[in-house]
Amino acid sequence: MKRPIGLIFSAVVLSLAALFLLLISSLMAFAGISAGHQPTVPATPHFVTYLMIAISGFYIALAIWAILTVIGILRLRSWARYSILIIGGGLAFISILAVFGLLLSRTMLPTLQTQQPAADPRITFIVFLVMGAINLLVAAVGIWWLIYFNRRAVRELFQNPVLASEHPGTAGSAVKSAPLAITLLACFFLFGAVCCIPLLFLPLPAFLLGFILPIPLARAFYLVCVIFISVIGYGLIKLREPARIAAIAFLILGICNAALTFLPWYQAQFRQYTANFISMIPTMPGQPTPSYFYSSTMIISSGMVGLIINLFLIWLLQRHRAAFRVPPPETMLEA
C-alpha cells in the first residue's frame, strides 16, 4: 500500500531525531568515561560520571523508542500511532515549557551579569533568541504530529490498513476512539512516566508539597509516579472511568502544590532544595560556584501557571466525561 507523504515525512524526521539522540548519547558516555582518565584534568567525582552515563543511557532508550516507532508507522501498526502521539505530545509540552522558562530566566540576567560582567548583553540576547526559536520549531513538529495522526483518515489507515485501502472511510467506524483532547492528555501522562524513569537511578532528592524527600524516599516516590502515571495514561486511551478519576486526583495534587507557592515557607524550602541540587554539581577549576536566587515573583508566577494548567486539564476531563461512559467496543459490535 502506498504510504501518505505526511507519514513518510514524519518517519524521516523521527529517524533524524533518533540519529541525533544516538550521537548525543555517544558524546555523553565518552565524556563521562574519559574525564577521569585525563592526566591534565582533576579527578572527576563519581557522581558526575554516573550522571553522564545515566543520561547517555536515557538518550539511547529514547533513540530505540524512536527507531521502533519509525518501523511501526511505516508498517502501519496501531501501537505506533499511539507512540508517535506520545512523542509529539511530549515534545510540544516540554518545548513550550522551555520557552516559558527562557522568558522567566530573562529576569535572572541582572544577577548573571553581576557575576560575569564581561558577558555581552547582545550575545546573551542572541543566544536566548536562537534557543527560543529552536524550541518553538520542536513544539511545532510535536503539534503537527498530534494533529496529523489524529485525523480520521490516518486513524482508519492504522486501525485496518487493508480495509482502509479497499473501502476508505469505513475502517474503525464501529470502534469508539478517544476524543482528541483525551488522547493528548494521555500522551502527556505516558511521556511524563517515561521522563521519571531516569530519576529512579540518579542520586537526587525530590521536592513534593514543600518537603525535600531524601534520596531513598525520592526513589520510592519516583517509582510510584512511574507506575501510577503509566496506568492513568493507558486508562485514558482506553476510556476507563477509574483512570479519569485518578487523573483528576493527580491534578488536584498539582493544584495543591501550586497553591503552596504563595507561602513564604514553601518558597524558602524550594530555594533550599535548588541550593542543595546545585551544590551537587561540580564546577571547573577556577570557576565560581553558580548562585541562583529564585525571587518570590518567579516562584509564584510558576505556581500560577501550574494552577491554570491543572484547572484547565480537570475541565477537559469533566467536559469529555461522557466519552468514558460508552459501552466497550465488544458490546457495541454485538449490538
Image (cartoon, helix red, strand yellow):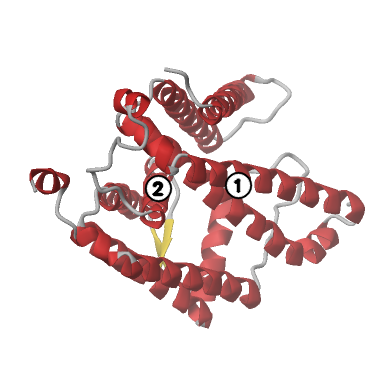
Q: Which of the pair 68/268 is nearer the observer?
A: 68
Residue 138 in the image: above or below residue 44: below
Which SS class for mark 1? Answer: helix
Q: Residue furthest top?
A: 1
At a point 35% along the width and 54% down the height, the residue shown is 179
Q: Is residue 246 visible?
A: yes
The kind of residue on which mark 1 rests is Ala
- The one of 191 and 259 positioned closer to us in this rendering: 191
Q: Give the number of callouts.
A: 2
Q: Residue at x 48, y 73 (%)?
A: 307
* Position of residue 319 in the picture relative to residue 239 (left or right): right
- Secondary structure of the residue carrying tag 2 is helix
Q: Which mark is residue 187?
A: 2
- Is residue 268 in view? no
4 lies left or right of 119: left
Q: Residues within 10 Å of mark 1 (few under 14, many from 20)?
A: many
Distance, label 1 to label 2, CA atoms, is 14 Å
Nearest the camera: 248 or 219? 248
In the image, residue 176 sits, relative to residue 55, either above or below, namely below
Residue 30 point in image, percent of width and height: 59, 21
Q: Earlier in the sequence, mark 1 or mark 2?
A: 1
Where does residue 313 sit, x and y in percent of width and height? 41, 65
Residue annotated with mark 1: 139
Provide residue 165's location: percent of width, then percent of height: 37, 24
